[in-house]
Amino acid sequence: MTEQKALCFANMYGVLGALVKLCETDNTAKEILSTIKNPVSLCFDVKGGPCRTFHFTKEGCKITEGAKGCNCKMNFASPEKFNLLINESKPGIPVKGTVKLLSFLLGTFSKLTDRLTELLRPDEKALENEDFFEQSTILTMYTIAGAVAGLANSDSIAKISAGNTVDGDILLGIKDKAYATLTVKDHHFSVLYEKTQKPRAIMEFSDVKLANGLFGGQVSTINEMCKGNIALSGMISMLDNVNRILDRVSLYLA
């Protein structure tokens, strides 16, 4: 069973959270951003759910919690309404910077999310290109990391695992390619798309191909752990809890 509020957090922190790395690493996204004349800080405020502001400039995208600093804002009456934005492109209610907001949503933002979808839900033929395959896999890892944090704080089942997780940094990564850090403080999860220098626990995949197989469910996690292709170290109880939350992520982002 999935919960609409938890799906809202998975979408906000997982799917849209990946815009940060998309804008940082993808040439197509960089071309789209190059058309921005003035910075746009777009806030999505969900009643009974998250409130985050996405700051877009020619240089990239950054995200802050809350509505502070936004020059465009869209309210959603419920998590269900926000999920319709992600799944069916149905907007919420513009409450600030309406003209700029609608222009940005229909133009730059729409193009960026289309590119995001292209990479996160790739065509099989596109995956034959080695560079695209790697980029898609790495972006998927960042999406999953964000969704773990979102669900750990909102999904009724994932919150049980979060409640059993001690404080500290958990490093998730694809060896020598990409890393994300889950920080746990008082059972609350947050995510950074970078490598922590002092992880309390580490889960590292040996290469991009393995990570892609794991994310897509084509290979066995237990098998690869036995082969040493998934390196686990540090506070193993933290990784056990993250694995349980990952099961929830696969359900929500299927």
Image: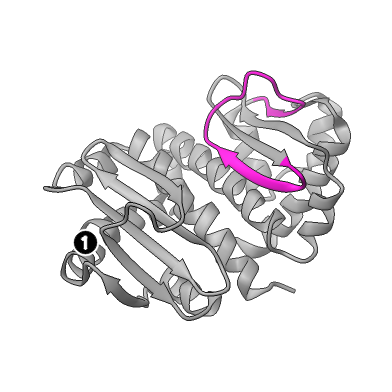
Residue bounds of the magenta highlight: 185-206
The residue nearer to you, when weighing 10 against 133, is 10
- Secondary structure of the residue carrying tag 1 is helix
Where does residue 85 sit, x and y in percent of width and height?
Answer: 41, 72
The type of residue carrying mark 1 is Phe
Q: Which residue is mark 1?
A: 104
Where does residue 38 sit, x and y in percent of width and height?
Answer: 14, 48
In the image, farthest residue toward the front: 68
Quadrant showing the C terminus: bottom right
Could one spot residue 230 in this view of the protein?
Answer: yes
Where does residue 32 sit, x and y in percent of width and height?
Answer: 21, 47
Is residue 188 positioned above or below 233 on the image? below
Drawn side of residue 70 relative to residue 36, left or right: right
Quadrant showing the N terminus: bottom right
Is residue 2 positioned above or below 32 on the image? below
Task: Using the rendered view, name the quadrant where residue 127 is placed.
Answer: top left
Where does residue 177 sit, x and y in percent of width and height?
Answer: 53, 24
Task: Using the rendered view, name the quadrant where residue 57 is placed.
Answer: top left
Residue depicted at 37% across the width and 52% down the height: 54
Residue depicted at 40% across the width and 74% down the height: 75
Q: Tell me if mark 1 has few (under 14), some (14-19) or many (20+) residues whose alpha carbon lies within 10 angstroms of its own.
A: some
Residue depicted at 58% across the width and 48% down the height: 146
Residue depicted at 78% across the width and 58% down the height: 159
